[in-house]
Amino acid sequence: MKRILISLWLVVTLVISFGCERRGVDGTDGDSGPVRVGYYGDLTGATSSFGQSTKNGVDMAADEINKSGGINGRQIEIITEDDQGEPNKAATVVTKLINQDRVHALLGEVASSNTLAAAPKAQESRVPMITPSSTNPAVTQVGDYIFRVCFIDPFQGEVMAKFAANNLKAKRAAILYDFNSDYSRGLQQFFKKSFTALGGAVVEEKSYTQGDRDFSGQLTAIRSANPDVIYVPGYYGQVGVIANQTRQLGIKAPLLGGDGWDAPQLWELGGDALNGSYISNHYSVDDPSPSIQKFVADYRARYNVVPDALAALGYDAMKVLADAIRRAGTTDRQKLRDAIAQTKDFAGVTGLITINTERNAVKPAVVLRLASSRFVYETTIYPEGMAPPAGSPTGD
Amino acid sequence: MDTFVQQLINGLNIGAIYALIALGYTMVYGILRLINFAHGDVYMVGAFAGYFLAHQFALAANPTAGGLAIVMLGSMIIAALVGMSIERFAYRPVRKYSRMTTLIMAIGVSLLIENLFVAQIGAAPRAFPDFLGSQSEPPFQLFGNAAISKAQIVIFAVSLGLMLLLQWVVYRTKVGTAMRAVSFNLNSAKLMGINTDAIIALTFAIGSALAAAAGILTAQYNPNIDPLMGILTGLKAFVAAVLGGIGNIPGAVLGGLLIGAAETFVVGYGQSIGIASTYRDAVAFAILILVLLLRPSGLLGSTVQEKV
Amino acid sequence: MPTYAKRLLGIFIALLLLYIGDALTSRDGLFGFGIPYYYAEILALTGISVILAVSLNLITGFTGQFSIGHAGFMAVGAYSSVFLTVYCTESLELWLAGIIGQTAAQSLVFMGVIICGALSAAIAGLIVGIPSLRLRGDYLAIVTLGFAEIIRIVILNIDSVGGATGFRGAVSPWPGRLIIPAYADFMWIAALAVLTVVIIYNIVNSDIGRALVAIREDELAAEAMGINTTRYKVIAFVISSAFAGVAGVLFGHFRQFLHTNDFQFIRSIEIIIMIVLGGMGSITGSVLGAIVITFLPELLRKLPGNLYSYRLVIYSALVILIMLTRPQGVMGVKEFGISWLRRAQRRPVGDKPVGESSGVPIAEQIPPSAIDRDKEVRNQ
């Protein structure tokens, strides 16, 4: 009994030693001082390359804004926390960012599962959160303070299905997806749905997980199903290898993929085996538009690598946030939230961003063809209800 | 039929890699009764050592089979040194304590290596140079649709060679006799005048070198290397060692090949018996559990009656 | 003071502390004051860690059976209980609320859910334990690891609990609650943590506990003394799994979001590090280990810039350092408490006669286990 009392006493002492704070006092200061933006992501876990790219994009955007005088004269301060890619840690660090660091807004996570764990904390405390690249539809359904600047899984799956059925005239598709990733599973599911609706057939479905080193078993099975196209909605680390092993097994069907393919390392891993594949993406590094070329050049100068889609989305998320703060003229949470919700035709690196009533970004996707270590622009596919601007090529 | 042959080639290919890693687990366990959790990370260190060697000495720019041999030898030496230092500075000081302590130590070392690599070079995957050119060349057609690539042939040949070499060292040399003596009974071996510390260090060196070879070989087939690549592969290789009968060298090879083949066949044919390919990673563990229940000492392991 | 009065006083103080703690961590606070939410959250997670560590200690520390699949049983408890609250208990709760009021109905239902979660984890433990506890120590370790991985992969394959997206509430097309209710507040977590400590403490100091310690010290000898070793090992394993399940229930209803990434191999390792740090075979040591290992990574967040990225390196280096310098853990097999302080005062250190039984738990009387591992090697 005494031991229990002592352990309890220890706990209480710990509690008191942390000190108490007054409840019900809103921590936000007025409209002076730096704008504190919390970034959380995986910086040390299995998906840390994604978290790091996004952070690079966010940091670069913040530095650009700060160099040009900040937002309404206020500098941006990025406070970064690492969640090790674990949902539980993601929720904890967001609690820390909100309650200890008193951030005005949050940017983060790549993986939808981590964003889903953290978003309720932001919603509860009414801190606006913009996720650069969580594509699962459920993320923004958490509440009216959660936004995103990327398109969602259903749209991306549909884009590739449309492209395969209409442009490539494919009838038989095989799918090889990452079982452990909700992103990959989302794309797999919606590609299948759209492709079947368009009259095609999914003849084989196989899965792998990120730790896998060998995909030949799956690919051999796919080979015997004899598909016209193989949809591989995975991340570049595995995709490059999959492309290689596909060609080594003598499979000629083109591979189709998503934005997860976009990384400089893809070429080193996949090499020539990638030629003739197609991906859907947020933007094209080879896009001649000056704003994109400036972004690519600046990023290369700063980090010595070509920016991937995650870096571009991180950059855009920060810019969208800054734009909203500028329009709101304040970091008052309610007003800032409203300003983000009213974002319309914001010219980001990843296209014109409009936030819709579901707080998702409505924007077109580009389809790129892979040829000799380059992503070559193929076509743009617009979401339903969004008319392509006059004079630009149409998707279907 | 050709699909079956293809799956068999694929399965044995990945199995050969598991087998090489499993040898390290089994040798260390045979001598110290220690699950060397850091062994999977030594495999990773081996792959990265090869990567940096290749780039350091400009072998990556002009890849040849000879370059591969140099890189492999270099990384095997580096991994052997890493393995020996792990033994010397982490395991030896706690060897006298309970098994639990040494196991925690092994886990700690494993975490340290992983975290150190992530902090130092980041977790982004890197591309290992393709020395054999098998990624641009078409594979050899066997018959029908079955094909085998250059990398796969090299993996089979080199791993077979290394296994035979190990067999020769363990059963035909004086050092090997000492190793077997130590694994049979450490104290008696010590009394017979065997320098047990040196033999243990040597065991770690050999096991680590084999893991490094596995790392380089697998990188020829799958060029994607990252600091966390050793976790899952290491676990499966350990399962392979247990499956074959831990402490038993031919058992480790058999276990490795079996696990590799089983995984591939579940992916290829599992659907028809109601196992989705999504259960692939569970297969190794399921087999392990089944075998342990039916034959707790593994396939080739001999049952040891505990003496009082 | 008579014993029953002491007990009553103890219970009263415990309840008072619980109430204060609950008020301090709540939204409204105690008289408008509370501890920062961030720390409140870590405290709650610490409570869950305490349950995990103390329960793992029963099987690993006291029985000497090395289990590295504790996170798997936690996952079973978490997912089964959350499945219940999301899909099954809503109407029951509404009906009960009409009779006994909202709060009471919620508490009653949650109590039932906790029991269900514990039961399902216990059943999982039984399924794993009966066959595998016949195996030697290291094999058990790898089998528990394998089972935990299989459990994780099976959960990933079940669409109604969210699969790879994570489980936040009812998944369409199945009807149910859209968000996991936040039942597990500080009061529940702290109360169950204390309850776990009390129950495990009593088990360890009962005849079962003596049998378990005997198995740890020498399984063959224990068997020779007429202890049905497999039976006792299974009992310990099932109890341990059940409490891991309770921790899972609390985690699910505290976090309101479940994802299999939170129940990976590394989580089991974290729990082991807790009990090794505190000292295997010491309950208070486990509590201490749970507190340190839950707080340490958060404290390491305060490290500046460059060191921040090395904080996990520092963390793992600390584990190695502890193993090198104090392999028996901070507490060894000793317990920390008032009587321990009193004894330390009364007698110079190192003068404790072995076998003195004035309230010294049985586990403390046994010298640190198997320091000389040559014995094990010799025996094989």
Image (cartoon, coloured by chain):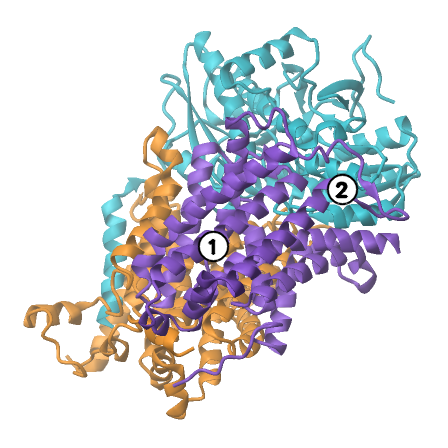
Chain colours: A cyan, B purple, C orange
Q: Residue at x 12, y 76 (%)?
A: C352
The circle on residue C267 is 1
- Whether C4 is drawn above or below A59: the answer is below
**Residue in the picture at 75% in, 47% down:** A216
Residue at horizontal 39%, vertical 42%? Answer: C312
For the C terminus of chain C, which image quadrant? bottom left
How many other residues sit within 10 Å of disc 1, few (<14), some (14-19) or many (≥20)? some
At mark 2, the secondary structure is loop
Left or right of C221, for residue B28? right
Q: Which mark is residue B149?
A: 2
- State the quadrant of the N terminus of chain C: bottom left
Residue type at mark 1: give it: Arg
Residue B11: which quarter of the image?
Answer: bottom right
Marks 1 & 2 on one chain: no
Front-lying residue, C359 or B284: B284
Residue B202 spot, x, y in % from top left:
42, 55
The picture quadrant where one finds residue A379 is top right
Residue C277 appears in the figure:
no
